[in-house]
Every structure is written in structure tokens, then in C-alpha cells.
Amino acid sequence: MRTLITNGTIVTADGSFAADVLVDGETIAAIGAGLAGMVQSDETIDATGRYVIPGGIDVHTHMELPFGGTFAKDTFETGTRAAAFGGTTSIVDFAVQSKGQALRTGLDAWHAKAEGNAVLDYGFHMIMSDVNDDSLAEMDQLVTEGVPDFKLFTAYPGVFYSDDAAIFRAMQQTTKNGGLILMHAENGPAIDVVAAQLVAEGKTDPYYHGIARFPVFEGEATNRVIRLAEAAGAPVYIVHLSVIDALTAVREARDRGTQAFAETCPQYLFLSLDDLGGGFNGAKFICSPPLRDKDPNWEQLWTGLRKNDLQVVSTDHCPFDFHGQKEMGRGDFRKIPNGLPGVEDRVDLLHDGGVVAGRISRERWVEIVSTEPAKLFGMYPKKGAIAVGSDADLVVYDPDRVRTISATTHHMDVDYSCYEGRAIQGGSDIVMSRGSVVVRNGVFTGRKGHGRFIRRAPADYARLA
Ligand SMILES: [Zn+2]
């Protein structure tokens, strides 16, 4: 099967230019002006007036994550299908090691969830809940199996929490095996103290979830884990950075030459502490770190993205229904499952709020939603690039189309949207995964089980820093 995409503007992290793209089988076979008259194809897609971009890569999703006695609602099938509608063609999800179990057991369980179900290609990071001699040795094996990153938490005592010794040992291990430690950096023990005090005072509404998790708790933990990484001689990646306190820690580390990387998420660029108000409705916006004050955080995070102190925007997609799931925390915000739906909206929100709003160039947009995630997580140039030989994960993107986000029209399996009623400019017309069109003008044409596991290699973090 050969497909020719003609008359579009190719937009990559490096630049934009008019050219046609020939897809042969699963990969890109040729790129050039005037290919239409020179090559045979089975199908021609006319991309006049539109961009041709590498498909989005969301390196932070939680399909079917067990949390607080329930499960994130999207499966690998529904979640990757929704991602495809939003112009994302690869995800990296988090397999979970349960306390007392092997990494292998958790990884096998996540392979079983995804295989035969995912619509798009997927990789895994490994969440480590139990750092010990056995799990440290297992890390080396996982790196060779294409799972080179490991996430640890300074939050959630008693669940995912690791103390400094555990974090430091895991970092030392990555200096030997080449992998990368991802950190959820908030001071969980201190947060739990404040949260318990608030609940004791009768402050149980979702809003107080945001109040309990002080910005300084994120700043402190971010600085601490970066310092531990420096001591171990390891690179480190901060997930879902939400606030200026943490951004400052990352910027200062990068300025002194540390291999520190960080992502933020759309919810920290477009939503704020105000959304957590309004009584129990605020439960829809509960995630950790929490939504922050709009000023000065939003503009500071955009500045971080422009200046490359932040390299990636991912979603932390972790959807729970408002009815029946978020409601488990009525009367105590600590019992509300943490997480927001978002995998479908990321590329469009960043286009609208970033490119259309004049905050970033369209090339930087492609870089933070696709190319840089591919590079940092060992998928480049197979993914995240428009180049001969790369996977034909391509999106024909209409930068002018306007639509309104709503739970009534989104494809995520969740009963609300954080962006309900928000009008945005930009949308994916054609979405292609390894040469197969999976979404065409708002209609799903993909196939459950099409998605394959992406075996990833450690990246050259020193070069990317
Ligand atoms: Zn997460």
C-alpha cells in the first residue's frame, strides 16, 4: 500500500516547507516537491491548506491504573482510540510494580492489558514501588527489553512513596545501566500532615486538595531529587511539573549543567486553582500536583517551554468518572481519585493556546508534543520525525478549523471534560499510524490490536541536556 500526501506544508521541529510525502507500507519512502507526477500510489491525500506533522507522542498516560480502590476508566483500546482522534499516534504508559512483587509481574500485567487491544503503538515506563536488591537487578534486564525508564515518587506515603535512600539507589543503578529515573516530586509526608489538619478543621471540599499541596512542597522535592541525581551522576526527568517553585529548581540545575529534564501538562497551562472551587464539582479537577494559581504560573511555564527548561508536554491522562468514581471522595478530598482525562485534547490545546495565541512557534509546538518526547524516550527518528525511513505516523492537521471541546463529543471513556465548552482552533483531519489511516475526518478507521509495543533504548541524555 502506497499513499501520497500532496500539497501540504510539512512542519517539523526544525522548520516548515512545502513538500509531498510518499508512504510505502509502514514507513516514509520519499519526501519532496512535485512527487505527485513522479510516483505511483494507491491513494492520494490532498493536504492543501493544511500541515503535515509527525504524530503526537504522549509519554505520560495511565490506562486502567488502579488508584484508591478503583481503576482509571480508559482501557488501552478506548484510550488509544481517543488519542488518535486528537492527533496522537504513540503513548508511553506506566506499568506498576506492586509492593512486594517483582517488576516483571507488573510489566507482564501491562503487556497483557495492551497487547491485542491498543489501536496505536505504545511503550512502557516502569513504576517502582519497592526498591530492593532484586528490583534493582531487574532494572538492568528491563532496559534491555525496551523499558529503559523508571518512575519513583516522593508523594503518596504508603502507596508509591520512596524515601531518599531508595531514590538514590535507583539513580545509582541507572548510571550503570544507562536508564532514566522519572520523578513525581512533591513532599508527600508533609502534604499528608497539612491535609489531615484541613480535614480536622472540616475543610473537606476538593478545593482543599489544592491548598494542602503547597507549591514549596513541589519545589523542595524537585530540588531534592535533582540534587540526589547529581550526587549519583544520573540524569533525571521531572514529571508533571506544575509550579514556578519547581521550574526554578529545574532551571537552576540546567544552568549548572545538570542533565535535568521536565515536562508539564495542559492542565497546568490552561486550568487553575479556581477550577477546584465551586463545591464538589471541583473533584473533576483533582490531580497531583494540583492545579495552581494562574498568576504567575501559566506564563512562567510557557516561558519555560520557550526557553527549553521544559522539554515536553504530556497529559498524565488518568480519567475517572465524576459519577461513581470522583464521588467516592464526597466529604473527604483525600478519597477522591487523582487524575484527569486529557489524552485526546493535548495536541489541539497546545496548538490553540500556544501557536494561535502567539506563545510558541508551530515548530516548537511539534517539538514539544512529538519530537522531543521521541528523543528523550528513545524512539527517535523511528517516531517523532518526518524523514525517509521513519514510521509513517503522520497527521494532516487543519490549523484553521474551530471546534468546541465537550464530553458529549469526545472519545475518552469518561463522563466529563475539564475543558467543557472551550472553543479551540486547530484539529486533526487525517491520522496515520505506521501507514494505516486510523482517523479520517472525524471517523475512526483504525483497528483494535493494530498497536505494537515500542522497544525503546536509553537516549543520549548528555547530548539532549
Ligand atoms: Zn502520572
Image (spheres, grey):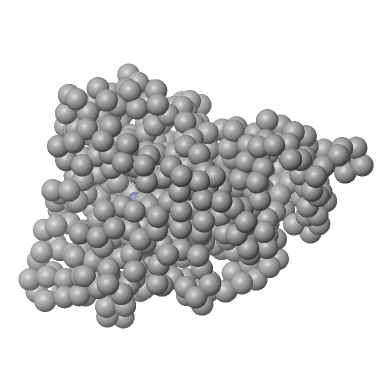
Q: Is residue 118 above or below residue 281?
A: above
Q: Residue at x 49, y 35 (%)?
A: 454
The residue nearer to you, when weighing 252 against 436, is 436
Q: Is residue 184 above or below residue 329?
A: above
Q: Residue furthest left?
A: 200
Q: Residue at x 80, y 54 (%)?
A: 46
Q: Count the marks: how many?
A: 0
Q: Residue furthest top?
A: 176
Q: Is residue 45 above or below residue 413?
A: above
- Taking the image as shown, residue 212 lies to the left or right of residue 451, namely left
Q: Residue at x 69, y 37 (%)?
A: 25
- Taking the image as shown, residue 426 lies to the left or right of residue 42, namely left
Task: Residue 329: tell me if it is visible.
Answer: yes
Q: Position of residue 240 (x, y in %)?
A: 37, 51
Q: Residue at x 44, y 39 (%)?
A: 123
Q: Position of residue 229 (x, y in %)?
A: 30, 31
Q: Position of residue 189 (x, y in %)?
A: 14, 51
Task: Residue 169: tell me if it is visible.
Answer: no
